[in-house]
Image: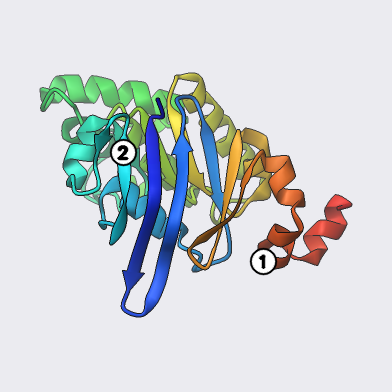
């Protein structure tokens, strides 16, 4: 039984088909990378999974249960956590307090007591590499650290499935390596991951499968190395320069 099954999901915004009959499954332990050109429907797909928007047609199933009309807070309590491209921490709070908000929000058994939420936040901050900065005002954080904080808030909800939306965007080569190690630690903790990314090093380095969207439709799905060599993917997304650099 799949952890998440997306079945023929379509979503329109006015006259634009953001998603058209997208189908795939996520198995426990997967790291699924979603790639494609800007405007391909990647974030809309994560929004449908997390409940920010509802699909017009199709179905999303969490194990055996349809969640297509389940509100976001209930999906969070089922075990679906996510990050957003634009990081919006609570500016008046510390790093620890921001992370504790995730623990307070996402527990399947109801709200934690504040002390328990703080303890859970401290554990997560160590995992993402922010333990030494737990008492920093959030406005003191660098951009890479704010991205780590976004991941920490989602992890504090104790998700079974973590949706990551371009957590590598704007990072330099060293910061990407650090973020890769963070993702590997998260996966080693037993969390299944679906991530949107434009950094192909990430797709090859941590993903077990890759799904390519183009104009809202699935172009190809499979092992990352095979997907990135596919001529359709090169023509629609990666470009000939990437192909030459890789010797494809």
Task: Using the rendered image of the protein, determine whether residue 240 is visible from the camera's viewpoint.
Answer: yes
SS for tag 2? strand
Quadrant that contains the N terminus: top left
Helix, strand, or loop for circle 1? helix
Reading the image, the residue beneath label 2 is 61
Judge whether residue 85 can be spotted in this image.
no
Depth check: 155 or 221 in front?
221
- Report the front residue among 82 and 40: 40
Task: Identify the image's colour scheme: rainbow, by chain, secondary structure or one colour.
Answer: rainbow
Decide: few, some or many residues near mark 1? Use Cα within 10 Å; few <14, some 14-19, many ≥20. some
Image height check: is 179 above or below 248? Answer: above
Image spot of residue 20 (x, y percent)? 43, 62
Q: Residues within 10 Å of mark 2 (few under 14, many from 20)?
A: some
Which labelled disc corresponds to residue 236?
Answer: 1
* Disc nearer the start of the sequence (2/1): 2
Picture residue at 60% right of the left edge, 55% below the top: 198
Q: In this view, does 236 lie above or below 133?
A: below
Quarter holding residue 79? top left
**Which label was assigned to residue 85?**
none
180, 229: nearer the viewer: 229
Rendered residue at 45%/54% (across/down) = 22
Q: Which of 236 and 120 lies nearest the eye of the viewer?
A: 236
Question: Which of the 4 image quarters holds residue 67?
Answer: top left
Residue 166 image point, x, y percent: 49, 51
């Amino acid at each position: 039984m799949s952890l998440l099954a997306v079945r023929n999901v379509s979503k329109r915004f006015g006259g634009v088909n953001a998603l058209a009959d997208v189908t795939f499954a996520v198995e426990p332990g997967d790291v699924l990378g979603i790639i494609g050109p800007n405007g391909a429907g990647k974030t809309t797909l994560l929004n449908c999974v997390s409940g920010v928007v509802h699909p017009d047609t199709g179905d999303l199933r969490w194990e055996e249960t349809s969640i297509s009309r389940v509100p976001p807070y209930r999906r969070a309590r089922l075990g679906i956590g996510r990050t957003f491209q634009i990081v919006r921490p609570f500016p008046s709070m510390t790093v620890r307090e921001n992370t504790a908000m995730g623990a307070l929000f996402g527990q399947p058994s109801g709200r934690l007591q504040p002390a328990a939420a703080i303890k859970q936040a401290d554990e997560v901050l160590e995992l993402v590499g922010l333990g030494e900065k737990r008492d920093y005002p959030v406005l003191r954080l660098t951009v890479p650290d704010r991205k780590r904080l976004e991941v920490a808030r989602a992890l504090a909800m104790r998700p079974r499935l973590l949706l990551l939306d371009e957590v590598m965007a704007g990072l330099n080569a060293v910061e990407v390596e650090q973020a890769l190690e963070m993702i590997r630690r998260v996966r080693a903790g037993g969390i299944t991951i679906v991530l949107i990314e434009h950094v192909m090093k990430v797709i090859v380095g941590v993903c077990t499968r890759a799904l390519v969207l183009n104009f809202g439709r699935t172009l190809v799905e499979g092992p990352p190395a095979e997907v990135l060599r596919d001529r359709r993917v090169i023509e629609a997304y990666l470009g000939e320069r990437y192909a030459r650099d890789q010797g494809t």
